[in-house]
Amino acid sequence: MRRCALLSCSLLLILSFLSGCQTLQGGAKGDYSFFYTPKDRVAELVAGQQYREADAEFARQREWFTANADDPEVAALLGTLSTGLRAEYGPGLEAATAAVKNLNWPAGQDQWAAVKSTLETLRQQVSQAGSAALFKEPDYRYAAIDEAERALKEQTDRIVQDAPQALARYLLAGGPRFFDVYPVELDEEAFLSEQKAIWTDRVKHSTGEELLKIHEEYGAILPADMKQELAEAYFRTLCPNAAKASLPVLLAAFAKTEKAGMELASVPGVKIAFLEVTSDTLKRKGVIEFPVAVKMDMPFEAVNGDLKKGFESPAVKDADIVIVFNLASTKTNRRVDTSNYVKSTCQVAIRQVPNPEWDVMQVELQQANTEILTSTAAKKDTSTADPWVNLGNAISNWGKDSEIEKAKGNIEDIKKKIRETPRYIDEPVFGPYRFQRVEMDVLKAGSVHYYIIDQRQKRYYSDFFDIQSKEFFTVCYDVQKTDPKYDEHMKTNVTEEYVDDFEKEPVTVKLSELLDQYAANKAKSKKYASLDTIREDVIKDRNVAVAAAQKESYGFDKRDDRRFESVVVVTASDGLGSGFYVTDDVVLTNYHVVEEQKFIEMKRFDKVETFGKVIGKDVRLDLALIKVQDRGRPVRFYRKKNVQIGETVEAIGHPEGLEFTLSRGVISTVRKAESANGVKGKPVLFIQTDTPINHGNSGGPLFLGNCVIGVNDWGLGKDYTEGLNFSIHYAEVCKFLDDNHIAYLKGE
């Protein structure tokens, strides 16, 4: 028994020793143990007046000291440490606090560095004392730190509040940056934004050299509106009265402002208007294939003049500078380098194939049925002679019944899915095809006559400039959208539509280049009394351009035969026909061209598109009248009673869509025949002619000289006979016009 007791005591001692030897986070003397604790280490450091090292050890072992805070020896030790730390930090902290409290503010600029140093000294003292871990504990908080922080905040706030007045007194362009020397740190951009009124006043009273210095020192931190204000102020030192300054002076001031790194949002007091006066004739002839636009690379207020009003446009009259464009010619040209065909595949058909999902569901259905059969076969007999056996078998069968019901539920779900799933699905069939790939250079070139009119100086300058643009394209034709590699093909190639858009888009010229050209040639500019002088020059230049284009064009003189001006293209719902003006705002055509349409689209010989409303019709005569929006040249009708067989007649119309085609024949005879529309009643009087009349001629005029003797109506098919065509006799036409109260013209 005694041996056991001794053994127990020894065991307790060993366990106590081991528990005391558990490692604590280390002190300078090594690991802590039951016999050497953090209190012992801190006590050693305090005894040696190593207060900062003791505080650092306290910070490392804060958890231990917190757990043993109720120990009187620990509390006494921490009190001694607090006293030592105060002796360590107190003198410097209190002296710096007193120095800050004794600062005199506002102070002159020569005192700012000393004030800044005093504040910084206290800031460092507060930082050092505040870094003591023990002072962060509520029970050991050092009141002198709080006092120092209050003094620092009060003095800093006072200096911040005085910053606007200090800025107003500070010479912005005469020394270092305000923010670099001011005693306290400010949010530079926010501060300047808040002091915009002071800033504006200082900028307003600064010279050009001072503004350059201000921009160098403060430009990077200025808000956008204040940057603009600075740029405008500098521009005004170079050009004090922009509204009256000559264009070269304006441009020089703008260039110098830009060179200084200042960006003007707009040149104050200067408005530019753009006006294009290109001849409509050149546009109709296709001489002008793309427009010219101005790239606004200078901050002038710009407007476009009204094309219809021209020089009378209010925008032009109100502008200080007017830039007029008269396009002499703009042409595109394609140079094809190579053309080849690329082999690929595309979808050519669709075939139906078995749906794999449907097959999977059939297998699942079969498996579910098999599960039911297996579970049913595995059920035990419950009709034996032994009731206890029957009971046991019934209990055993419960699980099988559950499996069977679950399988039946699965079968119903699978059947529903089968009903909703198609047995066959569409599968694309791909086959080979080729598409064309063409490599080409697209060149755009033109000549533009321009005028720069300075309406303030009453001077203008005119000159030509040539424009050129060139792009290389690889164009694909007939690439099929169903080609699996369609996206890949289009990454390196473009479509014809893309090239078309490039050819139609404007070529740009920089505004700065035009104005620089004017400034460089100011000596060549001319005085003018009124814009009428320039208008006359523009008209002369346009006529020269038209004449030059006429020499280069092939065709015929459209003014040689004025009869064409009376004929129109009539666009119907199922094609097109012909018509002609019988008064300056009424067109006559065939009923079978317009039928029951109410509104009809038309196009005149000068390419003007217009429209009209059907105001009269006669199905038997196959005639219809259209009230037209745009006026035209009316025809004159033949007025004699008789015509001569064999006389030459001419039809003007649009056979098979070939617009404004003239065909010629003779009068074969005059005869009556049934209406072309099969309407019963009186027969219609016709001019029979061998003049070719085809689809598209219907409704057009048949001329005998300059007078209309018929309205082209119908003809026998070319596969049946030749030269049997019929025009409604002018007598029938004139009676129809009289009945509809149309005041038409007769005779030569």
Image (cartoon, helix red, strand yellow):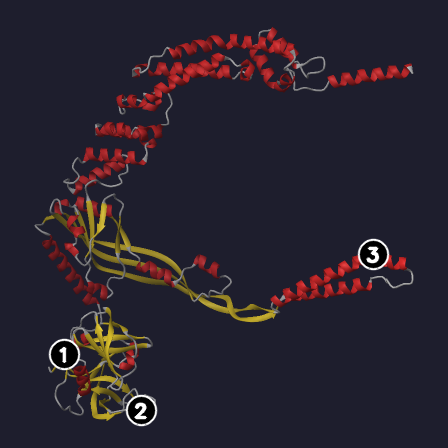
Q: Residue at x 13, y 90 (%)?
A: 641
| Label 2 residue SS | loop
Residue 741 in percent (x, y) is at: 16, 80
Residue 418 or 692: which is nearer the viewer? 418
Residue 291 in percent (x, y) is at: 26, 57
Of tags 3 and 2, the one toward the viewer is 3
Can I make out residue 166 in this image? yes
Number of on-image labels: 3
Of tags 1 and 2, the one toward the viewer is 1
| Label 3 residue SS | helix
Amino acid identity at mark 3: Ile
Return the residue at label 3.
Answer: 395
Mark 1 / mark 2, whichever is N-terminal: 2
Cα separation, mark 3 vs mark 2, equals: 101 Å
Question: Which mark is on residue 172?
Answer: none
Pointer 1 with pointer 2, Cβ within 8 A: no
Amino acid identity at mark 2: Thr
Pointer 3 with pointer 2, Cβ within 8 A: no
Mark 3 / mark 2, whichever is N-terminal: 3
The 10 Å Cα crowd at callout 1, few under 14, some 14 to 19, many 20 or more, is few
Quarter of the view holding residue 593: bottom left
Of tags 1 and 3, the one toward the viewer is 3
Mark 1 / mark 3, whichever is N-terminal: 3
Question: Which mark is on residue 743?
Answer: 1
Return the residue at label 2.
Answer: 721
